């Protein structure tokens, strides 16, 4: 991890305990975003950049009570908060992994991958998309989403300053280009005042 990546991780470690109280997420939007993954019972979904686990109950609901959720984040303290909410002993369907997205193995393991409210924080976004695409099974889906507008997200990071000042949510066209270069086909997008989402699939052979 670069020094900038380490600084960003340290910041999220520092914010972890206060994160849930300082942020809010519209559950209706979260359900919509989870629905974009078109999950089926028994499938394996990666919650990449899962933070404190805000999407876990929504992903679980769309898996219909079966399947596996791998919750991955580079911040060990963020994951610790998520794990406290969903203890492994009581939630055997959830696996917690401390790892940077670009350090993932690319073994076509996942039926679907979600990047919710985290993509601007990936320092090398094209490389991250390629890594995530390589981790999808044939026919697998990748969704990059925020429950706010692109403009609001980028304004928030500029106003926050410091290490977050340059954390940029690209346009739909920019993300579409990254996904195309990674061998994915974009199948839908939303970019309005209340929601941002881009959905893509790995074509079947």
Image (cartoon, grey):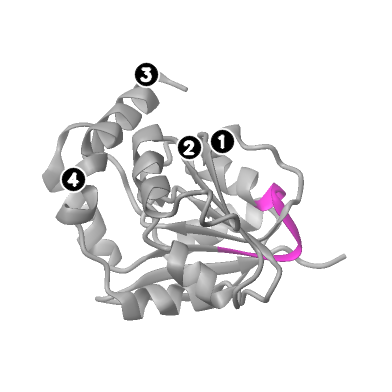
Q: Image height check: is 3 above or below 205?
A: above
Pinpoint residue 163: horizontal percent, then vertical percent.
24, 32
Q: Is residue 140 magenta?
A: yes
Residue positioned 44% across, 68% down in the render:
57
Q: Image height check: is 190 above or below 102?
A: below
Please state which of the two labelled residues, at mark 1 or mark 4, is closer to the viewer.
Answer: 4
N-terminal of the pair, mark 3 or mark 1, is: 3
Q: Give the farthest residue toward the front.
A: 89
N-terminal of the pair, mark 2 or mark 1, is: 1
Pinpoint residue 203: horizontal percent, then vertical percent.
77, 66
Image check: 196 left or right of 128? left
- In depth, the one of 39 and 125 nearer the eye is 39
The residues tagged by marks 1 and 4 sit, at their Cα atoms, a distance apart of 26 Å
Q: Image height check: is 26 above or below 104?
A: below
Please state which of the two labelled residues, at mark 2 or mark 3, is closer to the viewer.
Answer: 3
The residues tagged by marks 3 and 4 sit, at their Cα atoms, a distance apart of 24 Å
Residue positioned 51% across, 56% down in the render:
90
Return the residue at label 3.
3
Please state which of the two labelled residues, at mark 2 or mark 1, is closer to the viewer.
Answer: 1
Return the residue at label 2.
124
Pinpoint residue 84: horizontal percent, then vertical percent.
37, 47
Q: Are marks 3 and 4 in contact (CB under 8 Å)?
A: no
Return the residue at label 1.
102
Mark 2 neighbour density, 10 Å: few (under 14) some (14–19) many (20 or more): few
């Amino acid at each position: 991890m670069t020094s900038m990546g380490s600084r960003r991780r340290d910041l999220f470690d520092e914010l972890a305990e206060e994160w849930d109280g300082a942020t809010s997420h519209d559950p209706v939007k979260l359900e919509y975003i989870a629905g974009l993954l078109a999950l089926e019972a028994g499938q394996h979904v990666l919650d990449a950049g899962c933070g404190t686990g805000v999407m876990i109950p929504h992903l679980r609901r769309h898996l219909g009570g079966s399947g596996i959720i791998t919750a991955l984040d580079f911040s060990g303290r963020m994951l610790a908060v998520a794990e406290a909410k969903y203890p492994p002993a009581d939630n055997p369907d959830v696996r917690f992994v401390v790892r940077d997205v670009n350090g993932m193995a690319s073994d076509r393991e996942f039926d679907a991958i979600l990047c919710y409210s985290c993509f601007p924080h990936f320092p090398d976004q094209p490389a991250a998309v390629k890594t995530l695409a390589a981790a999808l099974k044939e026919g697998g889906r990748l969704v990059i989403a925020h429950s706010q507008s692109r403009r609001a997200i980028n304004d928030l990071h500029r106003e926050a300053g410091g290490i977050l000042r340059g954390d940029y949510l690209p346009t739909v066209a920019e993300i579409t280009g990254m996904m195309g270069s990674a061998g994915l086909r974009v199948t839908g997008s939303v970019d309005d005042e209340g929601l941002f989402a881009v959905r893509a699939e790995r074509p079947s052979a």
